[in-house]
Image: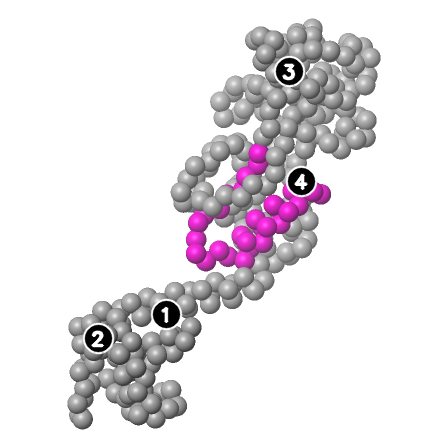
Amino acid sequence: MDNIGPLNVFMIVAETRSFVRTGEALGVSSSAVGKTMARLEKRLGVRLFHRNTRSIAITAEGVMFLERCRRIFSEIEAAEQELSQTMAAPRGRLRVSLPLAGMLFMPTITKFMRLFPEVTIDLDFTDRLVDVIEEGFDAVVRTGEVIDSRLMVRTLGKFSHRIVGSKDYFTRFGVPERPQDLSAHICLHHKYPSSGKLERWPLDASEGKLELPVSSMASTLEPLISMAEEGLGLACLPLFTIGRQIDDGKLVAVLDKHIEDVGEFRILWPSSRHLSPKIQAFVKFMAENLFHT
């Protein structure tokens, strides 16, 4: 940091072409300016200025050094702006894309809204793979791997699935003891809205291929949760969406030891040297609270 002061003096001399005016700008004598430049030239081993009693002219080496100094001070200014932004209160419109299952994130998102009332939340729920940059999103939440060098990524948490049904359902139809028993049960499936394909139940495949009955299907998870609670069949659902129902006894999980997957939610946002306070606050809050509320 001791080297920054002489660089600043050098830049002013290069702009004013005068030790006197540089000294006036800095509140020091022209002699002090001259000595500072002499020490800098000695340390660098090059002449930065041609000078005589009447004028000062910058050398070719001085021009090259001046451009580098300008970049250095520009980076310092940018760093100061970035730090000042982190201290600013989050505010403004925040456009976020969430998967359709993200409706179940609303308790966490509403807590964020109460904590940061000056942030206006604009939520878009879709399972479509959006283009974060081109479509103008500040952040998106998705499962699975996302490879895009333009984006920053942070893991929000891991989750697994559970096969669940109501106590009434198991009283009427019995409890499956192994995956093959599911062929005699009423199975409720999640359908991907973008492709129409059914989401695979992540069962251990060591006992061979298993064809599950398709009794009903839905493109969002909430209807499946409701149908399972009403005893209309078994559903395979992310644990974070049904933890409360399992704790309350409305749903009972079966075949846990045969579930083999672990999913992961990630939040992605455009890479930028100047991360706005609203995005910074949202990313941090979701990472710390989504699976801990």
Using the numbered discs, state the Cα–Cα distance from disc 1 to disc 2 in whole angstroms: 21 Å
The amino acid at mark 2 is: Val
Q: Position of residue 133 (x, y in %)?
A: 42, 45
Report the residue at 49% width, 26% height from top: 194
Query: SS for tag 3?
Result: strand
Using the numbered discs, state the Cα–Cα distance from disc 3 to disc 1 in whole angstroms: 64 Å
Q: What residue is shown with label 1?
A: 73
Report the residue at 61% width, 45% height from top: 287
Quick check: can you spot residue 12? no
Q: Which residues are magenta?
A: 264-293
Above-or-below relation of 208 to 18: above
Image disc number at residue 46: 2
Above-or-below relation of 15 to 116: below
**Front label number (4 vs 3):** 4
Q: Quadrant of the N terminus?
A: bottom left
Q: What residue is shown with label 3?
A: 216
Query: SS for tag 1?
Result: helix
Quick check: can you spot residue 87? yes
State if disc 3 and disc 4 touch (CB < 8 Å). Answer: no
Task: State which tag comes first along the sequence, 4 or 1.
Answer: 1
- Is 72 placed left or right of 79 in the picture? left
Image disc number at residue 291: 4
